[in-house]
């Protein structure tokens, strides 16, 4: 059956390209006014909402699942999701949420308070959904009545809503998850405007509109996510009408989009930096001096030009310049400039006066990551470091990093999608999560740095929090467990008649899309 559908899809796409060559490249060529075809670079492999988290998974799951609270248009503002109201209680040590009534799951079940409690119990068992969320008393989440959820904290904090609205803390149907078991990731059941219809691994994921959606059936009846690994091919498809929207746009293609009357760029706030990360738990990069040598050897401007064609900007530190509490001194007076002589001097101090160091560099197979790895490999060679590049599909690469045995360095993106530094720092850099199988895959364990993160997340005083985060950034830059080399623009490219694309944190909400 899947092969038959795949063949039919291929025939339709082939006809679309034929029509576009005859001047028919428009929204209709990608499926019609009630179909939105989206190019995405990787197959997420598994859509289980709690077991793994990545931008590739979130961009699909944001259409299928919903959280209690949604992120507003501005940083630190929030909108109703599956909860219509919320308030702090018990002197800030808990929150109460009033649930939206008459919400249906895709299997026809009505959402209950028990489903919400079950969802949080399920999240608590998975590191990808519970890691870094030590502020929540998971076992204490309970239903006060059929429409009220009580959520106790382990300490007073001001970050709860940010996590609830931008991570993978979705609400699931207890019956569906228990019945499907391990198959839930292939057949997810949520409350969102779209539900899973067809999935051919490595080819496409097809979602269909959920007619019983509490917010009203969406205008777009079909969301087709086509897996197109090469951004150049995705750009061709966008220009010829094979897709209406591409979520991964390369720097060299942005000028083509901006010069086109039929295409447009859609932009949001930058929340993600791309990093060269060190495995600091093992040699050779347990050596801080060696890490600093690499920091001086890295030419961020060259990476910006070669990989991203000058689009976007270099990163100045672990946080993006759009993130609250970014340390402006890192931009006005960068601690590491490209200096090969300084890098070689530090190499000698680290015990490698003549170079001769061979390391293992691990990446996923995203095109920009592959290109960046090649540029970085050449830059490291200038100070006597030979980097062997190992590229894997996302799921395999992810598991290797979590084990922390094979990699010496790796490339990855780290985001502050909540608008606060905590999302970037805590889960990925706090010492409590530096063990194998935990999300701090740099294995970074600075006590002072971690205490500053603890102090910030337990405070409701913004001035004090900002002071903590600025000090933390300075410590990070001195220790160099990772080097942020590129600040991603949060952007995508679309046909000009597509409206309603919403950029949320590092992901996308397509439920309000329509064609003019």
Image: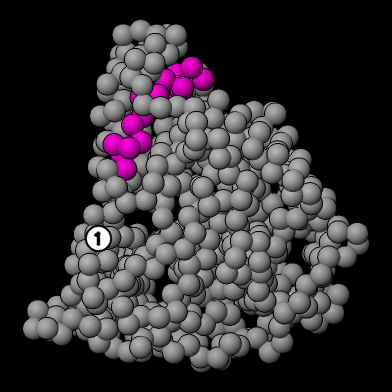
Query: Which residue in the rendered view is the most extreme toward the right?
Result: 90
User: For residue 37: magenta?
Assistant: no
Q: Residue at x 56, y 40 (%)?
A: 328
Please indicate whether residue 419 sits to the left or right of residue 146 in the image: left
Q: Residue at x 53, y 61 (%)?
A: 505
**Dominant secondary structure, magenta:** helix
- Viewer-proximal residue, 202 or 70? 70
Within 10 angstroms of label 1, few (less than 14), some, or many (20 or more) residues? few
How is the protein colored in the picture? one colour
158 vs 173, nearest the viewer: 158
The quadrant of the rendering that contains the N terminus is bottom left
The residue that label 1 is drawn on is: 255
Question: Split into 4 quadrants, where in the image is the C terminus?
Answer: bottom left
Please report the residue visible at 86 percent of the width from the left and 57 percent of the height from the top.
93
What residue range appears in magenta? 288-304
Return the x and y of residue 211 as percentages of the image width and height: 51, 92
Any magenta on residue 300? yes
Position of 71 compared to 233: left or right? Answer: right
How many dots with numbers?
1
Residue 17 in the image: above or below residue 394: below
Q: Is residue 398 above or below residue 230?
A: above
- Mark 1, secondary structure of its residue: helix
Residue 251 rendering spot, x and y as whole percentages: 28, 54
Q: Position of residue 193 (x, y in %)?
A: 52, 82
Q: Position of residue 268 (x, y in %)?
A: 46, 63
Q: Looking at the picture, does residue 273 appear above or below residue 281?
A: below
Q: Quadrant of residue 201?
A: bottom left
């Amino acid at each position: 059956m899947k092969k038959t559908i795949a063949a039919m899809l291929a025939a339709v796409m082939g006809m679309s390209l034929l029509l576009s060559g005859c001047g028919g490249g428009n929204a209709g060529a990608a499926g019609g006014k009630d179909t939105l075809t989206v190019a995405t670079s990787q197959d997420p492999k598994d859509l289980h909402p709690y077991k793994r988290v990545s931008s590739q998974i979130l961009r699909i799951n944001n259409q299928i699942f919903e959280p209690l609270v949604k992120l507003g248009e501005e940083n630190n503002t929030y909108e109703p999701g599956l909860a219509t109201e919320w308030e702090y209680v018990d002197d800030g040590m808990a929150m109460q949420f009033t649930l939206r009534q008459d919400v249906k799951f895709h299997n026809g079940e009505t959402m209950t308070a028990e489903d919400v409690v079950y969802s949080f119990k399920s999240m608590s068992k998975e590191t990808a959904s519970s890691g870094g969320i030590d502020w929540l008393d998971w076992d204490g989440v309970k239903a006060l009545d059929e429409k009220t959820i009580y959520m106790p904290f382990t300490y007073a904090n001001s970050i709860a809503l940010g996590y609830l609205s931008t991570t993978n803390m979705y609400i699931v149907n207890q019956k569906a998850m228990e019945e499907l078991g391990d198959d839930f990731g292939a057949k997810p059941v949520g409350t969102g405007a779209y539900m899973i219809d067809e999935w051919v691994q490595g080819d496409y994921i097809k979602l269909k509109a959920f007619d019983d959606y509490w917010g009203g059936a969406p205008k777009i009846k079909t969301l087709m996510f086509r897996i197109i690994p090469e951004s150049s091919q995705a750009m061709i498809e966008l220009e010829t009408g094979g897709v209406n929207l591409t979520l991964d746009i390369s720097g060299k293609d942005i000028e083509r989009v901006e010069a086109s009357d039929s295409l447009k760029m859609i932009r949001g706030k930058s929340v993600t930096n791309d990093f060269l990360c060190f495995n600091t738990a093992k040699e050779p990069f347990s050596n801080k001096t060696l890490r600093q040598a690499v920091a001086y050897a890295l030419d961020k401007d060259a990476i910006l030009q070669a990989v991203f064609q000058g689009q976007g900007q270099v990163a100045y530190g672990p946080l993006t310049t759009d993130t609250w509490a970014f340390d402006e001194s890192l931009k006005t007076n960068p601690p590491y400039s490209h200096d090969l002589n300084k890098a070689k001097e530090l190499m000698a101090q680290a015990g490698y006066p003549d170079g001769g160091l061979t390391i293992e560099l691990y990446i996923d197979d995203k095109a920009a990551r592959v290109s960046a790895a090649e540029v970085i490999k050449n830059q490291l060679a200038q100070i006597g470091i030979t980097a062997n590049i190992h590229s894997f599909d996302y799921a395999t690469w992810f598991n290797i990093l979590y084990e922390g045995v094979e990699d010496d360095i790796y490339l990855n993106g780290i985001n502050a999608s909540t608008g606060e530094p905590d999302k970037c720092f805590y889960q990925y850099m706090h010492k409590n999560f530096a063990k194998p199988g935990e999300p701090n895959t740099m294995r970074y364990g600075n006590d002072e740095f971690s205490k500053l993160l603890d102090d910030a997340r337990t405070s409701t005083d913004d001035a004090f929090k900002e002071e903590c985060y600025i000090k933390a950034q300075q410590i990070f830059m001195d220790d160099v467990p990772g080097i942020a080399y590129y600040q991603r623009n949060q952007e995508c490219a679309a046909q000009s008649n597509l409206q309603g694309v919403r950029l949320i944190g590092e992901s996308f909400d397509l439920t309000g899309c329509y064609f003019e």
